């Protein structure tokens, strides 16, 4: 796997199939990235389990905090790592000792550990490095692109959602739904006909 560039289908496949995510390194502080990524994914219907040895036994966002992955009393589909790259290998080794093993190891933005990735992939797990599931979910569900960000098309039409509000968009589609404005559609068709 090339860990410098992931196909959208690979990321979408992960986010569409995982249900339970253990976040290692979550902070109880509501101004920290790990906290709002946890909250965002929780609000999208993922079962989020906080892992932080310094907070073990307490609660973060209504969920009991565990000191280590091995303490979690249920199976997890994905381990989301919010720790520095140097700390990733022992976390992956602990994840591989779980029964059943998680299906995915996800390393947050700026977190890369090729040795840990190779070990996880050799055990049959999918690996993502240097990406944020919150950003990827928002991008692939059109929560970001409906505003014209990352879609290369500015539009006043919102993407088709799964319910009320932006928070209910899903990942099942391959392209932005909701479409561009009629003027943009005509411009794109004219450009295709000229080319």
Image: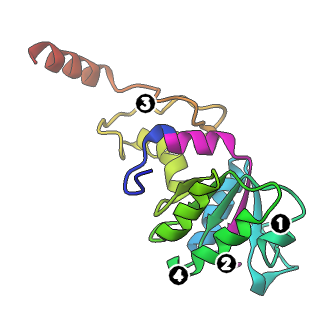
Q: Which mark is residue 63?
A: 1
Residue density around tag 1, few if under 14, some if 14–19, many if 20 or more, within 10 Å: few
Q: Which mark is residue 27?
A: 2
The answer for how far apart the CA atoms under marks 2 and 3 are is: 36 Å
Q: Which mark is residue 157?
A: 3
Among the two numbered marks 4 and 3 on one chain, the one whose residue lies closer to the N terminus: 4
Tell me the quarter of the picture where residue 101 sits. bottom right
Image-based side of 127 in relation to 79, left or right: left
Q: Residue 12: within the magenta?
A: yes
Residue density around tag 4, few if under 14, some if 14–19, many if 20 or more, within 10 Å: few
The answer for how far apart the CA atoms under marks 1 and 3 are is: 37 Å
The answer for how far apart the CA atoms under marks 2 and 4 are is: 18 Å
Among the two numbered marks 2 and 4 on one chain, the one whose residue lies closer to the N terminus: 2
The residue shown at (22%, 16%) is 189
Q: Nearer the viewer, mark 4 or mark 3?
A: 4
Residue pointed to by mark 4: 86
Report whether residue 4 is seen. yes
Report whether residue 31 is seen. no
Report x, y in % for residue 109. Answer: 47, 66
Among the two numbered marks 1 and 4 on one chain, the one whose residue lies closer to the N terminus: 1
The answer for how far apart the CA atoms under marks 1 and 4 are is: 27 Å
Q: Nearer the viewer, mark 2 or mark 4?
A: 4
Q: Which residues are magenta?
A: 10-28
Q: Secondary structure at mark 2?
A: loop
The residue shown at (48%, 59%) is 131
Q: Looking at the picture, does residue 140 appear above or below residue 105?
A: above
Residue density around tag 2, few if under 14, some if 14–19, many if 20 or more, within 10 Å: many
Report x, y in % for residue 149. Answer: 36, 46
């Amino acid at each position: 796997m090339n860990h410098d560039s992931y196909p959208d289908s690979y990321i979408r496949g992960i986010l569409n199939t995982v249900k339970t995510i253990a976040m290692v390194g979550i902070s109880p502080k509501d101004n920290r990235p790990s906290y709002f990524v946890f909250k965002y994914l929780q609000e999208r219907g993922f079962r989020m389990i906080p892992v932080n040895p310094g907070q073990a036994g307490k609660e973060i966002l209504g969920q009991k905090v565990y000191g280590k992955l091995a303490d979690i009393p249920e199976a997890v589909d994905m381990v989301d790592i919010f720790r520095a790259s140097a700390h990733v290998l022992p976390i992956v080794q602990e994840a591989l000792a779980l029964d059943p093993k998680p299906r995915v190891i996800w390393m947050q933005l700026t977190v890369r550990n090729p040795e840990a990735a190779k070990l996880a992939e050799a055990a049959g797990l999918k690996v993502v490095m240097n990406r944020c599931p919150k950003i990827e979910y928002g991008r692939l569900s059109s929560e970001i692109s409906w505003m014209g960000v990352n879609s290369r098309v500015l539009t006043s039409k919102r993407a088709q959602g799964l319910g009320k509000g932006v928070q209910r968009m899903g990942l099942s589609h391959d392209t932005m739904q909701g479409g561009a404005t009629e003027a943009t559609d005509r411009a794109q068709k004219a450009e295709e006909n000229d080319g």
